[in-house]
Amino acid sequence: MSDPMIDEWYPVALFSKLDAAGRDTLLMGHPIHVARTGSERVAATEADGRSLPVRIRYGHVWTSLGEPKKELFDIPEADEPGRRLVDVGVVRVRCSPLRAVENFLDIAHFPFVHTDILGAEPHTEVEKYDVEIREKEDEVWATKVKFFQPQAAKSAAGGITTDYMYRVPAPTCSVLYKTCPPRPGEWDVITLFVQPLTEELCDVWPWMALYDDEADMTDLIHFQQMIFLQDRSILENQIPRRLPLDPGMEIPTRADMTSVAYRRWLKRHNYTYGAQLVAQ
Amino acid sequence: MFPNNWCKWTPVALSADVPAGTVIPAWTPTGDVALWRSQSGQLSASSDRCPHRGMRLSHGFVRGEALACIYHGWSYGRDGACLRIPAHPDLQPPASINTRNQITTEREGIVWVVNEAQDEPPPSFDGYWPLRSMTFQASIAALEAAAGAKADISGLIRCTLGGETAFLLAVTKGEAETIVHVLADKNASLAQRIAISQAGEQLRRDAESADALEGAN
Amino acid sequence: MKLYDYILSPSCYKVRLLAALTGTQLTLRPVDFHPGGEHLSPALLALNPAGSIPILEDGELVLTESSAMLVYIAAKAAPEWLGSGDPAESAQIQQWLSFSHRLTASLGGARLVEMLLRPGDLAALQASGVKALRELEAALAVQRMKGDIFLTGSKPTVADIACFPYVALAPDGSIALDPYPSIRLWLRAVRALDGFIEMPGIHRLHELKPEPAKETA
Ligand code: FES
Ligand SMILES: [Fe+2]
C-alpha cells in the first residue's frame, strides 16, 4: 500500500470502554487488535503480532499502520479547565470515510436533514464564508460560517444565528467550533473522528468538549447521536459510495467551498483511501 | 421478459404504487430511477442520483410539480432541469444541472420507462389488470420453471395462480433477481385476487428454492 | 408517566410516537444505553430484570414491554387506537403486536449489529427480517385490495405503531425497503398522521409544508 494515508493516526477505540479483552477491528482493511494493558496503557497489534504505535487522546485510542511523520493533531481547547468532555460512542456507517468527513463540513443540509434542530425552512441560505488551506499547519479551515438554527444545542432554547468554524487537521478527522450559548465569546468543540475500516465502511467516533454545566451527560450524548444518526441514512445512500475527487462528477456551489477545499487538499496529498479518482 | 426485441419499454411499477405527490425507487436496464408523480398527476423518471452530491433522489420529496432532494433540497422539474437551490435562493440554477430523465408512459395501470423515444406504445393486456409487483431473488429461468410456463414471443408469461389465470411481466434485474408484475383478470373478485396474490408468494418460494438447489449442485 | 428512554431505540420511539399522536404527556428519563450500557445498571435492573428499555412508570405501575405500553396509553387517552372492539379486529391487533416482536428480533437485531456493533449473526438476522417484511407486504397488499391502508382497517391502531419503527428503520440494518410498494405507502400513511414525530433515520415529509415563498430583497 503506497497510500500516504497509511502514515496517519486513526481512532480505533473509546479509551474509557476499552478493557483487557480488547477489541478486534479493521484499519484500512487490516485486522488489528486493541486492548488495555494498564490503567493508562493500551496496546495495538496487527494480525502478525507486529505492534503499532499508540496514543491516548481526546477520549480515544489512536493508532497507525505506518510511521506517522507528525504527532497526532492538537486540539488546545481539549485541555481547558471547565469543559465537559463527552464520549459519544461509536456508530458504524456504510460509506467512504471521506464522505463522512465531507458531510460533517456541510451546513446547507441542516434544514432538510436536521429539521427544526440545526436548521429549518425558510432559513436555507448559506452566506459567503472564508475558506483557506493553512500552509503552515497544513489544515483546511472554514471561518465566519453563519447559519440560522431553530435549536442550536441541547442547552439552546429558541432560534439563533450560530457561528461556526470548521477545521480538517487529518484526512478522516474534523473539528467544529461553534457558538456556545452559555458562554458568549467561547467556542464549543465538536469533533468527528473517523476510523476507516475499508474504503467503503467506517466506524465514526464523535466527541465533544463543551462548556455546559447544566445539561445531563446522557442528554449531551443523545443530542449528538441524534444528529449523527440523521446523517447516517444520507451517507449510506450517496452514489458512488466513494468520494469523487475529480471535478465533473458532482456539482458544487458557493455553499460547498469547504468541501471543495477539502477535496483539493486530499488530492494534493494523494489522500485517496475512500476516494474515486476517475469518473465511473 | 421485458424489455425485449419487440418491446423496448420496461414495466417499472404499478400506477397505483406511485400516487400523486410521491416518489419511489425503480429499476431500468439503463440505470436506477426515481419515479415520481407531481401533485397534478404527471409522471417522471429521473436518474436516481442527485447531480449535487450523489444522494439518491428516490429518498427525496415531491412538492407541487417538482422533485426535491432530501439532502440539500435542490429541486428538479419534469424536464430534469434544476429549478431551485435553497442555499442560494436568489440564484437561477445553470441549465447544465439536470437529472437526465427517461421517457415514461402509463397504460392500463402499469408505468413503463424507456430511454429513447419509441414509435410503438407499450403493449396492452387484453382485459388483464395489474395486481401487485414482487421482487424474486431468482432467475427468469427459475421463475418460468416454478410457473410451469415460458414467456411467449411478446415476453408475457401466462400461468395459473391460485386456480386462476394470471399474467406475469418479468424484468431481469440481475443474474438472480427478477421483478415480477402480476396481472389478474380485470373482473376477478376480491377473493380471486387475494388467492392469486397468495399463490404469488408460493410461486416466489418455489422459484427461489429452485435457484437455491441449482446453486448447491 | 415516566418513560426510560433512548433516542435511538425504535421500541422507545413507539411509545413516544403514540404519546405524541394521542396528546399524552410523558416525562422522559434518558438512559445511556450506548455507549454507557446504563440499562444493565443495578438501578435499572431493579426496575426491569430483563435489562431492556423502554420502561414505563405510572404511579405504582411499571411496564417493561413496549406493546403493553402502547395498549396502556391508548386505553387511557385514546381508546380508538385499540380498534372498534370487534372480536376479529381485536385479535388481529394482538396478532400484529406479537408480530412486531419478530420485527424487533430480526430487523432490530440486524440494525444493532450494523450500526452499534453489537454481536450477532448478521446474515441470519437479515434473512429473517426479509421474511417478515415479505409477510407484511403481502398482508398490506391484501389490505389495499380491500381499499384499506392500515394493518387492520382504514384507521391506524396500536398495531401500526408497534410495527412501524423497525420497518421504517430496516435500512439501518442494511435491509433495503425498495422491493415493497405496499409497505412504502403504509409507512407514508403513518408518517402523514396528524401529530406524527420523527426519530433519527426517519426524515420529515417536507412536502407536507409548502415551499417557502421567495423573499424579495
Ligand atoms: S445531494 Fe441532492 S441537493 Fe445536495
Ligand atoms: Fe448533518
Image (cartoon, rainbow, N blue to C red):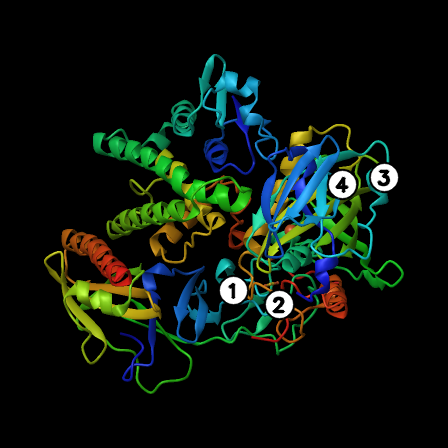
Q: According to the image, label 1 marks what residue?
A: B67
**Residue sitting at the far left:** B163
Q: Let me know if marks 4 and 1 both belong to one chain.
A: no
Q: Residues within 10 Å of mark 3 (few under 14, many from 20)?
A: few
Q: Earlier in the sequence, mark 3 or mark 4?
A: 4
- Measured in 3D between alpha carbons, the distance from the residue under mark 2 to the one under mark 4, in whole angstroms, is 34 Å
Callout 2 touching callout 1 (CB < 8 Å): no
**Residue sitting at the far bottom:** B119
**Which three-letter amino acid code belongs to the residue tagged 2?**
His
Q: Decide which of C39, A29 is in the foreground and name it.
A: A29
Q: Secondary structure at mark 1?
A: strand
Q: Let me know if marks 2 and 1 both belong to one chain.
A: yes
What residue lies at 71% left-to-right and 49% top-to-bottom?
Answer: A52
User: Closer to us: mark 2 or mark 3?
Assistant: 2
- Residue A170 in sight: yes
Instruction: Give x and y (percent) for residue A196.
Output: 63, 54
Q: According to the image, label 4 marks what residue?
A: A58
Ligand 1 falls in quadrant: bottom right
Q: Let me know if marks 2 and 3 both belong to one chain.
A: no
Q: Earlier in the sequence, mark 2 or mark 1?
A: 2
What residue lies at 27% left-to-right and 50% top-to-bottom?
Answer: C138
| The CB of the residue at mark 2 lies under 8 Å from ligand 1 | yes
Q: Chain of mark 1?
A: B
Q: Chain of mark 4?
A: A
User: Closer to us: mark 3 or mark 1?
Assistant: 3
Is residue B40 toward the left or the right of residue A47 in the image?
A: left
User: Closer to us: mark 3 or mark 4?
Assistant: 4
Q: Decide which of B87, A122 is in the foreground and name it.
A: B87
**Which three-letter amino acid code belongs to the residue tagged 4?**
Tyr
